[in-house]
Amino acid sequence: MLLMMPMLAATAQDNTWEQPEKSATAANPDQKYLAGAVPEVNGKVMFETTIKAPGKSKEQIYDIVLKQMTKMTKEDNQFEQSRIVLTDDESHAKVVASYQEWLVFKNKPLSLDRTRLFFHLMADIKDGELTLKMTRIYYLYDEEREPTTYQAEEWITDRYGLNKKQTKLARVSGKFRRKTIDRKDYIFQKFQQLLN
């Protein structure tokens, strides 16, 4: 019997941004995902980084950021709802984008495990400096069969995304934590490369 799946706007079957995993040499390959890897600010999950861009004006940084954030809305893993929600063409101080994208956990024959990831990316810009924040993170999982929504605060924080001893990732929510951190790292590193 052939099951028909509803057509979805984004068709990514893999995380095109993801690098193949290298063999782990550390004692614990999950070390970077453990306690403290998912920061909370006022009870909300928020990843933040400040990137120095010496010699670049606020206007130059704004143009680079707006171009990259717009480009991200058109990547293969994005849904049509991904868009720039705020620009500041007068003072060049802020850009905000809202993204909906596939986050793939596993893609093997007859087994595709993925979730829809929702997040906002906020850029605060000054002369020679960019502060990026990834926030308002949540997931829509198993939407083809039994859709379940998970808020980052109740799913990937240290309390929920790790075992009780905080020595390894939780069995179910741990995969969300791992892939969200990987995606955040990729996005932040991309902006670092563009500004240096």
Image: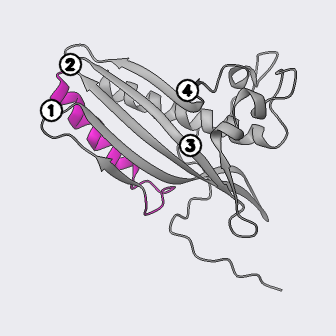
Which element is circle 1 on?
A: loop
Q: Position of residue 12 (x, y in %)?
A: 56, 59
> Is residue 87 or residue 74 the one in the foreground?
87
Numbered mark located on residue 91 in the image? 1
Which element is circle 3 on?
A: strand
Q: Which residue is mark 4?
A: 42
Question: In which quadrant of the rendered view does residue 34 lie?
Answer: top right
For marks 1 and 2, give the CA distance: 11 Å
**Badge 1 or badge 3: first in the primary sequence:** 1
Which element is circle 2 on?
A: loop
Examine the structure image and report whether residue 37 is included in the region drawn in magenta. Answer: no
Numbered mark located on residue 56 in the image? none
| Residue drawn at point x = 27 percent, y = 34 percent | 94
**Badge 3 or badge 2: first in the primary sequence:** 2
Examine the structure image and report whether residue 80 is included in the region drawn in magenta. Answer: yes
Question: In which quadrant of the rendered view does residue 53 lie?
Answer: top left
Task: Specify the segment rendered in magenta.
Answer: 56-81
Q: Which residue is mark 2?
A: 127
Q: Position of residue 139 (x, y in %)?
A: 63, 51
For marks 4 and 3, give the CA distance: 14 Å
> Which one is closest to the eye, mark 4 or mark 3?
4
| Residue drawn at point x = 53 percent, y = 43 percent | 17
Residue placed furthest toward the bottom:
1
Q: In the image, is 191 to the left or to the right of 21?
A: left
**Badge 2 or badge 4: first in the primary sequence:** 4
Q: Amino acid at mark 1?
A: Ser
Q: Amino acid at mark 2?
A: Asp
| Residue drawn at point x = 73 percent, y = 27 percent | 158
Q: Which residue is mark 3?
A: 137
Q: In the image, is 59 to the left or to the right of 52?
A: left
**Badge 4 or badge 3: first in the primary sequence:** 4
> Is residue 64 or residue 25 the one in the foreground?
64
